[in-house]
Image: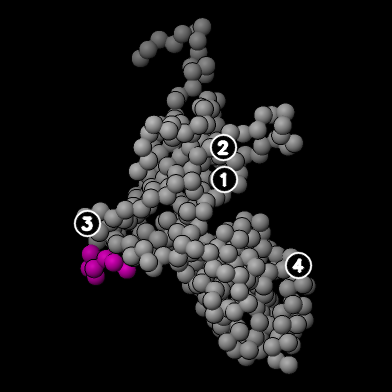
Amino acid sequence: MAEQNPQNPPENNPPDTSADRLEMRLPASAEWVRVVRLATAGVASRVGFSYDEVEDIKLAVAEACNNAIIHSTTDTAPGANTPHVTVCWQVLPGGVRISVADEGRLDPPGIVRKSTPEADESSDELPESGMGLLLIESLMDEVEHESGPDLDTTIQMTKYLVPAAAPEERSTPARPHPDSPVSLRPVRKKSVSPDPTKPTR
Amino acid sequence: MEIGLRIYEANGAKIVEANGDIELHNAPRLREELKAICEIKHVCCVIDMSKVPFIDSTGVGVLVGALKRAREHGGTLTLACPQPRVRRVFEITGLLKALPIFDSLDEATGACRLDYTKSNA
């Protein structure tokens, strides 16, 4: 074990969490989406997103999980093993990238509604389904989805931090999200600008 | 997590007070409860959303389906007191202006009954 330097105690050098990756594998069952939402809130709060941004990310991830679960249960042959969904949170220097992967097959893009419906008096025109991808694309900064050779589909969503206003410009202090974990050690905030040289998937 | 539902009558309307998140897991139950109410001929149904902190697209779809069913049976359905996050979901999905949403239970009940009177005049 390295000797601790009393001149430079550990609390002056908090761990670099800017490239941390978390992963969760869960049964493709709707009852577990709430757990994914809570975990997402914890990660997003730790990265430094505001209360509203954390709520946006939670909803987007929930929609992606819903999508994965629906397609897992409808596309798996009877008698097959319980399908699972894998959620991965990748902390970026200026944000977070979250992927949700299923073991089924995403419906053709044409089925997914991407445009907002017209505000119409006629309730016949109002959509009852297919709004999930619209929500994801509206709430996150970047969204990609791809299908693999084994009919598995992954939705990848990225949200970037927006530079916060200087303390003297804020009228009220920023409030922590209620789901954010209690920090035992100070977390060093990195620059919020995304790396333009890194390709996005 | 199951959603809590309290159903009662007030001022001639059926009030459905929802308590909890409306999501993929519990949406089917809400759909069945609203189906039974909205198939009552000429029903005035008000959904009190004041205790719903979260709704996903599945939940939105259930509400839209209930609205359509009520209208198909000559009735009406309104939404009362959605929380800001829920209102945001309606806004993103383009339904904020299309759905009959009101800031108080009284307004929602009043509008429900007015809509019923107009459509059955």
Task: Residue B109: say if magenta.
Answer: no
Question: Of the numbered discs in the image, which one, if any, rests on residue A150?
Answer: 3
Q: What residue type is labelled 4?
A: Ser
Return the residue at label 2: A162
Q: Which mark is residue A53?
A: 1
Residue drawn where x is 35% and y is 57% of the image: A27
Residue at position x 43%, y 31% in the image: A195
The answer to whether tags 2 and 4 share a subunit is: no
N-term-proximal mark, 1 vs 3: 1
User: Which callout, 1 or 2, points to the residue nearer the camera?
Assistant: 2
Q: Quadrant of the C terminus of chain A?
A: top left
The residue labelled by disc 4 is B104
Kind of residue at disc 2 = Val
Amino acid type at mark 3: Asp
Instruction: Determine the image quadrant of residue B48.
Output: bottom right
Of the numbered discs 3 and 2, the one sitting upstream in the chain is: 3
